[in-house]
């Protein structure tokens, strides 16, 4: 099962070649990850779940200043398959968990053309390894039972990069 997070492009995301810049792609992944996993200030869930999704939200991390837990990036890998042009409709970022470890998880992504646009195009594949860190001690902490319960339904095979 996957989360679908619609992300709007900004004109400033484009580079001189007219497509989304590689540094901006990391920002888009971050924005989708925050919507999927961080609790919003208003208590809402920013992600749109699949129709077959189970109840509950994946957005359970407190990302605000002063939070007890930090989710720190340990690793990222991005594979660019097609240039992402400027699109007025939000791109569809699919997210799932490729690995759920003791203190870390691998967030996997596939970035597609907007929902309803045919033919559907896969622009980018990516993965991010996040480590849960106790803010007070600055040391990794175990993924809690609540986090594991919220994220386990989205556990699937990791991204298969082409390795050309």
Image: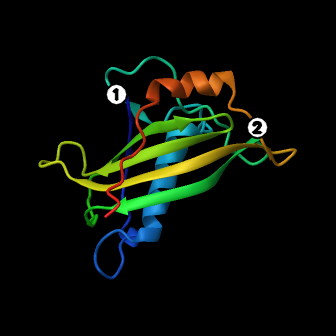
Which residue is denoted by mark 2 in the rendering? 141
Give the residue displayed 45% in from the left and 57% down from the top: 28
Residue at coordinates 37% horizontally, 28% vertically from top-left? 1
Tell which circle, 2 or 1, labels the residue nearer the N-terminal end: 1
Dot 2 falls on a residue whose secondary structure is loop
Whether residue 90 is visible here, answered yes or no, is no
Q: Secondary structure at mark 1?
A: loop
Viewer-closest of 114 and 147 = 147
Q: Compared to 49, does 17 lie above or below?
A: below
Res. 126 visible in picture: yes
Residue 15: % across, % down: 36, 77
82 vs 42, left or right, is left
Q: Is residue 61 left or right of residue 14?
A: right
In-front residue for pair 143/58? 143
- Which residue is outermost to the front? 164
The circle drawn on residue 113 is: none
Identify the residue at image location x=51%, y=25%. 152
Q: Residue furthest left?
A: 119
Mark 2: few, some, or many residues within 10 Å (few <14, many ≥20)? Answer: some
Residue 25: x %, y % from top left: 42, 62
Outermost residue, bottom side: 16
* Figure check: 24 above or below 93: below
User: Which of 86 and 130 lies nearest the eye of the viewer?
Assistant: 130
Identify the residue at horizontal 62%, vertical 53% (top origin): 73
Compared with residue 23, is residue 105 higher up or lower down, i.e. above or below?
above
Query: Is 39 left or right of 153, judged from the image as shown?
Result: right
Residue 86, quarter of picture: bottom left
Q: Disc count in the image?
A: 2
Judging by the rendered image, the residue that carries numbered circle 1 is 50
């Amino acid at each position: 099962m996957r989360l679908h997070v619609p992300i709007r492009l900004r004109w400033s995301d484009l580079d001189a070649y007219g497509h989304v810049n590689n540094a901006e792609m990391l920002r888009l992944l971050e924005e989708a990850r925050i919507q999927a996993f961080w609790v919003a200030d208003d208590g809402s869930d920013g992600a749109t779940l699949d129709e077959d999704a189970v109840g509950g939200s994946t957005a359970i991390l407190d990302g605000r200043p002063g939070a007890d837990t930090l989710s720190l990036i340990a690793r990222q890998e991005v594979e660019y398959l097609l240039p992402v042009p400027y699109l007025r409709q939000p791109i569809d970022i699919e997210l799932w968990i490729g690995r759920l470890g003791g203190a870390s998880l691998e967030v996997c992504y596939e970035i597609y053309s907007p929902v309803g646009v045919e033919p559907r195009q896969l622009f980018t594949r990516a993965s991010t390894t996040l480590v849960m860190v106790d803010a007070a001690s600055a040391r990794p902490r175990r993924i809690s039972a609540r986090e594991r319960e919220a994220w386990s339904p989205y556990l699937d095979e990791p991204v298969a990069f082409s390795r050309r």
